[in-house]
Image (spheres, helix red, strand yellow):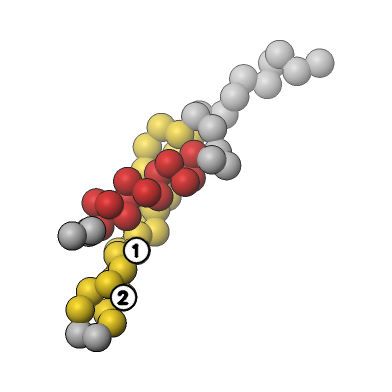
Amino acid sequence: MPDHTDAVENAVPWASTTTRNLRWFEVTQMRDEIEDREVRHYQVTIKVGFTPEDQAEDP
């Protein structure tokens, strides 16, 4: 059964599609959606840290 770990494992690769050089993450919120008296969806909100690319090479 999916859980918050699965939500994090989906969120980090998704974040990496728009931000390079990810270094860390922090889960800031966890929530679940209940449907028909059962947990149906797990959601997480994360903060990510990244290392900026070296801009010294730009002309």
In the rendered structure, the answer to whether residue 39 lies left or right of residue 17 reads left
Find residue 34 and report its image quarter: bottom left
Q: Nearer the viewer, residue 27 or 40?
A: 40
Find residue 43 and report its image quarter: bottom left
Q: Residues within 10 Å of mark 2 (few under 14, many from 20)?
A: few
In the rendered structure, the answer to whether residue 34 lies left or right of residue 23 reads left
Amino acid, disc 1: Gln
Q: Secondary structure at mark 2?
A: strand
In the rendered structure, the answer to whether residue 32 lies left or right of residue 22 reads left
Q: Which residue is mark 2?
A: 33
Q: In the picture shown, does residue 53 fall above or below 7?
A: above
Q: Nearer the viewer, residue 40 or 45?
A: 40
Q: In the picture shown, does residue 28 fall above or below 14?
A: below
Residue extending furthest right?
A: 59
Find residue 39 and report its image quarter: bottom left
Q: What is the x, y in percent for residue 23?
A: 41, 32
Q: CA distance from mark 1 to mark 2?
A: 8 Å
Image quarter (top left, top right, bottom left or bottom right) of the N terminus: bottom left
* Res 10 seen here: yes
Q: What is the x, y in percent for residue 6?
A: 27, 52
Amino acid, disc 2: Glu
Residue at screen point 69% across, 16% down: 56
Q: In the picture shown, does residue 51 fall above or below 41?
A: above
Q: Which residue is mark 1?
A: 43
CB within 8 Å, label 1 to label 2: yes
Residue at screen point 45% across, 34% down: 22
Earlier sequence position, callout 1 versus callout 2: 2
Residue at screen point 35% across, 60% down: 44
